[in-house]
Amino acid sequence: MAMPNQALIDLIIEKFDGEIMEDNKWRVDGSKPGTHYWVEWHPFHKHYSCGCKGYAFRKSCRHIKKLSESFRNNLHRI
Ligand SMILES: [Zn+2]
């Protein structure tokens, strides 16, 4: 995956009210106020991981889904 461009990064920050702290790593808000999780893209393994319980149980969660969907949708539009 190519590095996201600035417009895409802005969109993610706006959409998730999150922060991008490092390359390929995003902070997203949890469902409870004041909670947040880290979603990470692993380029080598080509998959996302998340710090929430849903991911721990199912190896997938809504944070990853939302993030990857917004990447996909945005890439189609550009
Ligand atoms: Zn999650």
Image: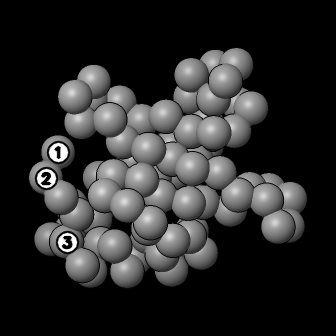
The residue identified by callout 2 is: 2
Secondary structure under the numbered disc 3 in the rendered image: loop
Secondary structure under the numbered disc 1 in the rendered image: loop
Vertical relation: 40 (above or below) 22:
above
User: Which residue corresponds to the image point at 60% horizontal and 60% vertical from the top-left?
Assistant: 28
Q: Report the image quarter containing ligand 1.
A: top right
Q: Quadrant of residue 23?
A: bottom left
Rounded to the nearest whole Å, what is the CA distance between mark 1 and mark 2? Answer: 4 Å
Q: Along the horizontal axis of the image, is 67 left or right of 7?
A: right
Image position, residue 63 (x, y; %)? 58, 47
User: Which residue corresponds to the image point at 69% horizontal and 39% vertical from the top-left?
Assistant: 52
Q: Quadrant of the N terminus?
A: top left
In the depicted view, which residue is nearer to us: 1 or 62?
A: 1
Q: Label 3 is placed on what type of residue?
A: Asn
Q: Are marks 1 and 2 in contact (CB under 8 Å)?
A: yes
The residue identified by callout 1 is: 1
The residue identified by callout 3 is: 5
Q: Along the horizontal axis of the image, is 57 left or right of 47?
A: right
Q: Quadrant of the C terminus?
A: bottom left
